[in-house]
Structure formats: structure tokens, C-alpha cells
Amino acid sequence: MPSRPGAPRAAAAAATPTAPVARVEAAAAGEAGPVGRLGPVDGLAQLSFLVMTMLERRAAEHDLSIAATRLLGVLRDREPTMNELARLLDLDKSSVTGLVDRAERRGLVARVPSPADRRSVHVKLTADGRSLVSAAAADFATDVSAVLGRLPDRDRAALDRILSRLLVAHAASQGIDLFAGTRGMPAQRS
């Protein structure tokens, strides 16, 4: 099959690193056509992979599993019972017990008696746990800020509003108040 004159040159130009970079830069600027956009399913899946990769890396730097990172994150602004922790983490009670046991052995959390029910305990961060989760959260916030920094301010603000509405509504549908224990505390911003 005969080739068009200049076809090898065009193919070589398309294969150079500058062509993909130009497409990525155009997409980041909101200039990409339909070929340069992901649908919501692919976009959310790819974003979740990116976020989990950053979170796993930061957790590992602090010798934490993802489950332990989630536990410490929940405890930043509340002192739930074991049953509440199981619901907040969407884990069965025996998994939460093991998770809290391991974090307690490391000195990151403590069980304290419930003032309302002598048979129940609350779980809270220790000073070491608070220090560790603050450092890990700051590192993770740096990573997220670098990713979000590629967006214009207007898009970042819109994303913040959409994510907040979506996550608050989802939590509420599960009977979870994401802001319980945070009343009167400054909002966590990254």
C-alpha cells in the first residue's frame, strides 16, 4: 500500500514526547476536545488510584497501613466508641478491635472508659498519635495540593464544593455525620 508523502514525518512528530505533553497541557487548561476528557466513571477511578498511591506512600513513610491511617484520621476530631469506629471505618468489630490493639501497642491511641456507659470504651489519640497523624496529614496535603495546583482557582473551588456535597450526602445516607465532634473546630483545608 503506497504511503502519503510526509506520512513518516507526521507519524514521527506524533510519536515525539511533545505531542502528548501538548495534549496534557491543553486538557489541564480545559481546552481538550472530547477525546481528551474522561467520563465520570473513568475519571473517578483514575483519581482514586492517584489518591490511594499518594496516601499509601505517605502512610508507609510513617510505618502505617492504610487501615491504621484511616483509624488515626477518624480520631483526629472525635473519640468514638468501638461500635462507632466500626461503622465509621466500615469494618466489622473484630477487625476494629485488632486495629485498635495494634495502634495502642504503638502508643498511638488509648481506650478510655465511657462516661455514659461503664461497659463501653471510647478510643482517642495519644499525643504521639496526634503528632504522627498531623505529620502524615501534612505530607499528604502537600501531595494533594500539588495535584490540585494544576487546576485554576475556580475549578479547585468547584471541585471542593462538589466533593463536599457528594461525601456528606453519602455519609448521611449511611447514618454518619462527618462533622460530629468537629463543631467549633476550624475546617481542615488543603
Image (spheres, helix red, strand yellow):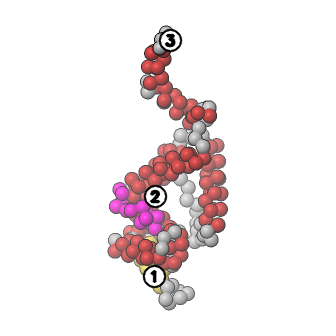
Picture coordinates of residue 46, whole percent (x, y): 51, 47
Which of 89/147 is in front? 89
Q: Is residue 55 above or below residue 171?
A: above
Question: Do the residues bearing badges 3 and 2 touch, measured as CB atoms within 8 Å?
Answer: no
The numbered mark, 2 or 1, whose residue comes first in the sequence reads 1
Q: Is residue 106 above or below residue 170?
A: below
Picture coordinates of residue 164, whole percent (x, y): 62, 57
> Between tags 1 and 3, which lies in front?
3
Would residue 40 be visible to someone looking at this image? yes
Would residue 135 be visible to someone looking at this image? no
According to the image, label 2 marks what residue? 137
Q: Amino acid at mark 2?
A: Ala
The numbered mark, 3 or 2, whose residue comes first in the sequence reads 3
Task: Categorize mark 2 by other alpha carbons within 10 Å: few (<14), some (14-19), many (20+).
Answer: some
* Element marked by disc 2: helix
Q: Amino acid at mark 3?
A: Arg
According to the image, label 1 marks what residue? 112
According to the image, label 3 marks what residue? 4
Task: Categorize mark 3 by other alpha carbons within 10 Å: few (<14), some (14-19), many (20+).
Answer: few
The numbered mark, 1 or 3, whose residue comes first in the sequence reads 3
Query: Residue at left 35%, top 56%?
Result: 61
> What is the number of the mark on residue 22?
none
Q: Amino acid at mark 1?
A: Val
* Element marked by disc 1: strand
Specify the segment rendered in magenta.
60-71
Mark-to-mark CA distance, 3 and 2:
56 Å
